[in-house]
């Protein structure tokens, strides 16, 4: 079997049309990510996009490169199908989620190419289409509506609104969106900004305003409060920050703190994402897939997981619409839906990538 020959990180910078703001102070104005390339002994190459998020995972471009420097000598020489050995190496290196996820995804693609296939051929779909959502950051009303209009024109019919800093401001923006886009479904991401005391009142007002569900309204440490809030059944709760890993998910399932799991392959890779999805499905929970603010290439690789059994809710696969350019041709949406058949033509474009590559 082919073995791992080389692991090559290639940083890049992709500008955004406007900044994405969320939580209490986080802001993203450009995608400063790493394109990871894994080459096997038979010449097959796999790629993945690594998105450092300092305020979420504590990873920066520098720590990602350092993590890859540390892991590469332990992985080079291993057979690509020796998943037990590969996962042992990754498992023995705590934290650094997006660096390890990128390695996992790139290895999956390298293996697929060594078998003469693409990832699209490897992951058979459970359903033929997926509803796609678009993330709106915290912004003034005019900026938000302009961003929403761009997404709507591109075929998006579900919007995820960042909330939690200001209830009246949230309600005003939600009302403006409902008025401007009456056929669009809305849900919210509060990014852990509420206290247990204020959360019920906020959720009640958001529910009355027409939101479908809300993601992580409480700090992750407030486990019992999340449990109580879920039992109150004001709005369905989405687990994201509270379920970073398979171990986290098992804890949340035992305490029954959520209704919908937001899976993000960019932080868990394919191997752990599939394990988490299987566990979540076995426990009767719903799931969606998030793209972690990726380019069109990362969105494509993430989209493959959105078609797996157990994913039932709209998936965040449209962030690339906010980017000024890209190096993978993502298929157009059709009245809010992404179709499996349309993903077949997605390919990494090396010439386009060079326009955004950083030589560090």
Image: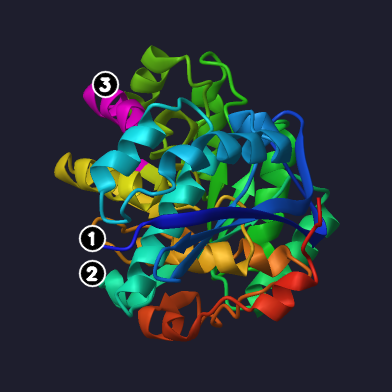
| Residue 265 on image: x %, y % | 44, 50
In the image, 352 versus 58, the foreground residue is 352
User: Distance between the Cα atoms at labels 2 and 1?
Assistant: 5 Å
In the image, 107 versus 331, the foreground residue is 107
Q: Is residue 325 visible?
A: no
- Per the rendered image, the range of residues in magenta is 245-260
Residue 61: which quarter of the image?
top right
Asked whether disc 2 touches disc 1, contact meaning CB atoms under 8 Å apart, the reply is: yes
In the image, 173 versus 109, the foreground residue is 109
Residue at position x 64%, y 63% from top?
A: 295
- Residue 250 belongs to magenta span: yes
Which residue in the protein does label 1 denote? 309
Q: Residues within 10 Å of mark 3 (few under 14, many from 20)?
A: some
Residue at position x 38%, y 76% from top?
A: 118
Q: Earlier in the sequence, mark 2 or mark 3?
A: 2
**Magenta stretch, overall SS:** helix
The tag on residue 126 is 2
Residue 55: which quarter of the image?
top right
User: Distance between the Cα atoms at labels 2 and 3?
Assistant: 29 Å
Asked whether disc 3 touches disc 1, contact meaning CB atoms under 8 Å apart, the reply is: no
Residue 184: which quarter of the image?
bottom right
| Residue 216 on image: x %, y % | 50, 32
The tag on residue 243 is none
Residue farthest to the left, as pictured: 282
Which residue in the protein does label 3 denote? 255
User: Distance between the Cα atoms at labels 3 and 1?
Assistant: 24 Å
The quarter in which the N terminus is drawn is bottom left
């Amino acid at each position: 079997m082919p073995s791992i020959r080389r692991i090559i990180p290639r940083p890049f910078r992709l500008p955004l049309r406007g900044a994405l703001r969320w939580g209490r102070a986080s802001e993203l104005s450009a995608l400063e990510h790493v394109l990871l390339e894994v080459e096997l002994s038979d010449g097959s190459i796999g790629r993945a996009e690594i998105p450092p998020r300092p305020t979420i995972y504590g990873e920066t471009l520098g720590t990602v490169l350092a993590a890859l420097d540390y892991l590469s000598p332990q992985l080079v020489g291993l057979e690509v199908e020796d998943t037990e050995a590969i996962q042992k190496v990754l498992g023995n290196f705590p934290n650094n989620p997006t660096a390890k996820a990128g390695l996992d995804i790139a290895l999956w693609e390298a293996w697929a190419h060594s078998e003469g296939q693409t990832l699209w051929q490897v992951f058979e779909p459970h359903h033929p289409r997926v509803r796609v959502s678009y993330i709106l950051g915290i912004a003034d009303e005019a900026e938000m509506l302009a961003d929403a209009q761009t997404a709507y024109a591109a075929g998006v019919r579900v919007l995820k609104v960042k909330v939690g800093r200001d209830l009246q401001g949230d309600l005003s923006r939600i009302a403006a969106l409902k008025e401007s886009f009456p056929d669009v479904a809305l849900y919210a991401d509060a990014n852990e900004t509420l206290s247990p005391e204020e959360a019920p009142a906020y959720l009640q007002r958001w529910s009355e305003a027409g939101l479908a569900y809300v993601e992580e309204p409480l700090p992750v440490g407030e486990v019992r409060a999340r449990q109580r809030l879920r039992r109150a059944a004001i709005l369905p709760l989405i687990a994201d920050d509270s379920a970073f890993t398979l171990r986290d998910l098992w804890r949340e399932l035992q305490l029954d703190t959520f209704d919908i799991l937001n899976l993000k392959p960019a932080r868990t890779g394919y191997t752990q994402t599939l394990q988490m999805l299987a566990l979540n499905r076995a426990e009767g929970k719903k799931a969606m897939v998030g793209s972690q603010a990726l380019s069109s290439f990362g969105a494509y690789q993430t989209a493959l997981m959105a078609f797996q059994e157990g994913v039932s809710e709209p998936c965040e696969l449209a962030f690339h619409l906010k980017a000024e350019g890209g190096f993978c041709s993502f298929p157009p949406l059709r009245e809010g839906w992404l179709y499996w058949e349309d993903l077949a033509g997605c390919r990494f474009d090396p010439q386009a990538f060079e326009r955004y590559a950083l030589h560090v």
